[in-house]
Amino acid sequence: MTEMSKVVRTITSLSFPFILIYGLYVIAHGHLTPGGGFQGGAIVASALAMIIVAFGSKWVLDRIKEKNISLLESVGAICFILLAFFGLTYADPVFFKNFVVDNPYLFGQVVTDNAANINTAGVIPLMNFAVGLKVIAGLFVIVLVLAYASTAMEGKK
Amino acid sequence: MDKRTIIGSIFFTIVLVFILFAMLMTHPFGDISESDMDDTIIENCQEETGANNAVTSVVFDYRGFDTLGEATILFTAVAGVILIFRRVLHD
Amino acid sequence: MSIESIMGDLLVHAPAMIIAIPLLGAFLTPIISRINGTLRNVFVISIMGLTSLFVGVLANDIFTSRVIKTYVFGGSQELTSPVVRILLEIDALSMFMAMIVLIVAFVAVIYSWGFMKEYTGLDKYYTLVLLMTAGMFGMVLTGDLFNFFVFLEITSIASCALIAFWTTKGESIEAAFKYIVISAIGALFVLFAIAILYGQYNALNIATLASVMKYTFLDKVALVLLVGALAMKAGIVPMHMWLPDSYGRAPASVTLILVGATQASLYGVFRVCFTLYGKSLSLTNNILGLEDGFPLALGTSLGILVVLLAIVTMLVGVFMALKQSDFKRLIGFAAVAEIGYMMLGLGVALLSIEPTGLSGSGLMALKGGIFHIFNDALDIGLMFLVAGAVYWATKERSLDKLGGLARNMKYTSIFFVIGLFAVAGMPPFNGFASKLLIYESVFQISPILSIVAILSSIMLLAVFVKVFHSVFLGPAIPKFKNVKEAPISLLVAMIIISVLIVFIGIFPEMFLNNIVGPATDALVNYSGYIDAVVLGGM
Amino acid sequence: MIYNIPFIAVAALILIGLYAVVFKRNLIKIVIGITLIECGVNLFLITLGYREGGIAPIFTNLPSGTSATMALPVPQALTLTSIVIGVAVLALMLALVVHIYRHYNTLDAREVRRLKE
């Protein structure tokens, strides 16, 4: 895919940060409002897909290698499964235990008065971040590789 | 009529009958007879997980293992796509 | 911390670790393979070793004490009612399948070391192999229907990508596309059936569903969809065409794991028929009279259908194998025929299921079918490994162009002979024991079917003898004068499987009593499976 | 009867998708058919979770003490999982179709037949 006209590129650059922030907001508030790691990740990935469409996949691949993005995805997946493994190290150990809940530290509070308190839900927000990172990287690399491959193959014909 | 069309027609007709019957016999929309499991989750999710969003508490806590599988599937797809296009990417 | 407490902890968490460790290994592999290729191979083998430690500990416990183990994710281990969390439920059959998966995956990884050396993209290859292993472990160990679906999808996506490994050839891509279409549709029907069950009973746990099953019309629809979709994924006629295609075009090490994945789908069929629907089928089967306007109960008619399809599967597999000229594709059709034997065992068991449970010929058939799952994985697996070794040495897959290889590849041809006799069910090897059980039990239902089964086995022997003659014997072909024996890792992989084949062939009774017997009992005893999870039992 | 429209939509989506998979010759159309079946199954799952007069199962800023009926949360979680699985399958299928087009120069299923019987 070659790059599109200047109008498209400018509007893409303008709207990109807003979509990015909205996606990150959805990821961060996954345990309070509708949304979560997958949904927010998909929003951010769609912003990145917009960049690929506007600037062309070659432009993107020149700046970031698909190997590194897929490494980022591995990191997200490792964070997620390590959070599950950490459940084994606490009292009453179980794989996938929500070990952070009900302690005074980060994300540890338990509220029952329906207030929108972001400092709750234990391991869920952490898992949301891990999954969010994974989904952003995963969908981005899928779109990037498919776009680049179809362009490269057309060139060969 | 080649072989594929004939086998396909038989297969399609069987599935058609099954799905139409299944849809006719399903309970009316919105009228749920059994909801033990979900009611337990709705009642307990705030105390047990601390999350106000019951869906998220199901996704990451009660059925967290499914989510691990789901994340794995995305990982698998990425690995598969890169594997398939490895020659195109590294020319 | 004493040794006992550590062993106790290992045992308690072993079910989760069997799935989690290959997953963690798969996530780590892309990072480790950036450092060094050899380090990556060592890492993957050590992950497999760690997994086999857990499998060994758990299998030892389950086959000696014969209890059903459960593992609840994320909560206290005490079972609540209703069951809201995902749980793994492991009985002897699950453990039996997990052993097959472990053997197949371990051997495949060892085999890959030498076989895949010269290709690129190996980091992703090993990642996908580990993911596929984890997916198969999940399928056989889980006690939750939706979880089963998720792992089914992991297995099929990973295997599809691996089938397409040789992307320079259009045929591999075509085989992979066929495979993904079949498995996507199959998996979606499985999901549809799960949704039907969930909508009625608001439960996803297999034991809970089995205990509250009312066997309404919708349940019957779900049963047919589940059995149909999973049998399609297991490669039964008329949906068998993807199987020789993908078996024939995947790298040999991948084919070995694919055999395991097919068996895992077959395990799903067994589990659905005898555990999820065990109570309903045994209470309604063989009762003459009108049931919902049908003259036969659904279980009986399903049994007849499965027996007929199994016979057709055998015949189609054998006759198609006769006229193949591609080495691996021929073995793929032989694999189709072997699927027929396992399905035959299942069908006979379904026919003879009774309100008092399963006994006599039905039990024997089921035992034979389950035993044959293990034997098929080993026998067909060994044949594919030999075919892979021949391909590695000659880069040639057509039977017409191969010949006289026994001079240069002595060990490989010995392994082929072992596999040949094992697949055909000759006495000193393992295939004989399980096929004999199937023949005997089928004979009591209908002698003709039994004769057809024996005949197709003999024809398999003839097919493979012909292959042996054309590949390994005959005049030396100048092109293959300098062919070398397969490298050490290929030989080690083949030795492991051959030793198992000979061992089981010499001591079938021991294997039957200690491993297959408990597995069959666990499958037939659905109330035990339910009691282990549902409070207050049935 | 108006309430059963979602189920009719489910049946329609699945059958249209199946029709495309079985009878269409174009590989892209087959892929579209599989996606349609998947949409139908997802719709079925999510409709199973609706409860008459229910609200979304989220407690945030719900007035304390109110006991509203809530829709079932589990089907929503299952649908989320199933959607992601669908994306993965779709990505892999499209990647394969791109490759098939490169090797065979066609998208007609009748001509993509180097693997004979």
Image (cartoon, helix red, strand yellow):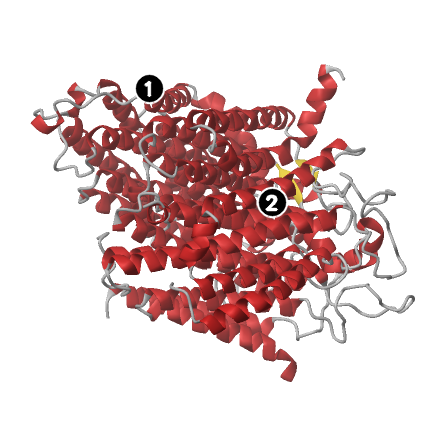
What amino acid is at disc 1?
Ile
Residue of label 1? C488
Q: Estimate the x, y position of residue A88 in percent, counting from the top left.
A: 72, 33
For label 2, the crowd category at 10 Å Cα-Cα, with few meaning under 14, some 14 to 19 and many 20 or more, is many
Q: State the SS at label 1.
A: helix
Left or right of D103 in this view: A111: right
Q: Taking C424 as reference, is B61 above or below it?
A: below
Hey, which residue is sitting farthest top in the picture? Answer: C2
Residue of label 2? A76
The chain letter under disc 1 is: C
Q: Estimate the x, y position of residue B21 in percent, counting from the top left.
A: 53, 72
Asked if residue D54 shows in the view, the reply is: yes
Q: Nearer the viewer, residue D17 or C424?
A: D17
Q: CA separation, marks 2 and 1?
A: 37 Å
Q: Estimate the x, y position of residue C427 in percent, counting from the top left.
A: 32, 24
Asked if residue C423 shows in the view, the reply is: no
Q: Taking A54 as reference, is B86 above or below it?
A: above
